[in-house]
Every structure is written in structure tokens, then in C-alpha cells.
């Protein structure tokens, strides 16, 4: 299990024990993170699974991928740490990861 913390706009912190090999979105939904709606089921079409990766973790989670770009652009989310959580695969290296969920998903 990989410990990951989600921080809501109101400051509420929720820690989940994520399963590696699944996406961050799948783990968030399974872990009851309400701000991750994931309407499209992980196909990078809805933008309702966005997270803002804490600056300390951006090198580990990586850059926005080509698949994510159109949806992130359409969302108007300009946070420097924005990613689609459905496109981040949980690995043991993400132990301790901290992400924030955007106001538009609260
Ligand atoms: S679940 Fe829809 S874009 Fe990630």
C-alpha cells in the first residue's frame, strides 16, 4: 500500500492507502475522495479528476502527458502542478505523495 494524502480546498486532509499499479484516480474513488468525480472513468475526457501535485512531488509524478493536454487546457486550470489523476499510475515511489483538489471540484 502507498500512503497518499489529498487536501481539499477547505484544508481537509484525507489519507488513503493506495494500491500500486492502479491509477491515482481509481485509488481516490475507492478511497472515498469526493472531489475526484472521474465522470469519464479514466479516459482523459472529463477533467473531473484533476489534482494539483505538491511542488515537492512534481519531479516524481512527471509532466502533463500528451493525452492530458487537451482536457487540462479546456478546463482552464493553470495551476503549475495540475495533472489528470487518471493518468498517474501509483507506484511505491509515490509513498507520501500530497495532492490538492481544485476548487472547481469541491
Ligand atoms: S477520469 Fe475523466 S479525465 Fe480523468
Image: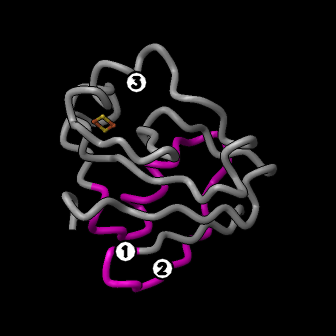
3 or 2: tag closer to the N-terminus: 2
Q: Which residues are magenta?
A: 8-36
**Residues at marks 3 and 2, CA–CA distance in whole angstroms:** 25 Å
Outermost residue, top side? 66
Number of residue marks? 3
Q: According to the image, label 1 marks what residue?
A: 8
What kind of element bears circle 3? loop
- Ligand 1 rendered quadrant: top left
Q: Give residue 72's position: percent from left, percent from top.
A: 32, 31
Q: Find out whether the residues at labels 2 and 1 contact each other: C-beta distance under 8 Å.
A: yes
Identify the image quadrant of residue 22: top right
| Mark 3 Cα-neighbour bin, 10 Å: few <14, some 14–19, many ≥20 | many
Vertical placement of 10 versus 69: above or below?
Answer: below
**Mark 2, residues whose alpha carbon is within 10 Å: few (<14), some, or many (≥20)?**
some
5 relative position to 49: left or right = right
Say if disc 3 is inside 8 Å of ligand 1. Answer: yes
User: Picture coordinates of residue 92 (x, y %)?
Assistant: 79, 51
Between label 3 and label 2, give the one nearer the viewer.
3
Closest to the camera, between mark 2 and mark 1, is: 1
Confirm or reject: label 1 Cβ below 8 Å from ligand 1: no
Q: Does the stretch in magenta take in 22? A: yes
Residue 53 point in image, percent of width and height: 55, 53
Q: Which residue corresponds to mark 3?
A: 68
In this view, the residue in front, 73 or 88, is 73
Locate the N terminus and report the quarter of the image it occupies: bottom right
Could you tell me residue 88's position as x and y percent? 55, 38
Q: Which residue is mark 2?
A: 14
Residue drawn at x 51%, y 47% as measured from the top left: 81
Are discs 3 and 2 less than 8 Å apart at CB? no
Question: Is 56 drawn above or below residue 61 in the view shown?
Answer: below
Residue extending furthest right? Answer: 93
As measured in the structure, the alpha-carbon distance from the residue carrying label 2 to the one carrying label 1 is 8 Å
Amino acid at each position: 500500500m502507498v500512503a497518499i494524502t489529498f487536501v481539499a480546498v477547505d484544508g481537509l486532509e484525507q489519507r488513503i492507502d493506495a494500491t500500486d499499479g492502479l491509477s491515482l484516480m481509481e485509488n481516490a474513488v475507492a478511497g472515498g475522495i469526493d472531489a475526484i468525480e472521474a465522470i469519464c472513468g479514466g479516459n482523459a475526457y472529463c477533467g473531473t479528476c484533476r489534482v494539483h501535485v505538491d511542488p515537492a512531488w512534481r519531479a516524481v509524478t512527471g509532466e502533463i502527458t500528451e493525452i492530458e493536454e487537451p482536457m487540462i487546457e479546456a478546463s482552464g486550470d493553470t495551476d503549475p502542478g495540475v495533472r489528470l489523476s487518471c493518468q498517474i499510475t501509483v507506484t511505491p515511489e509515490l509513498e507520501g505523495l500530497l495532492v490538492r483538489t481544485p476548487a472547481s471540484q469541491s
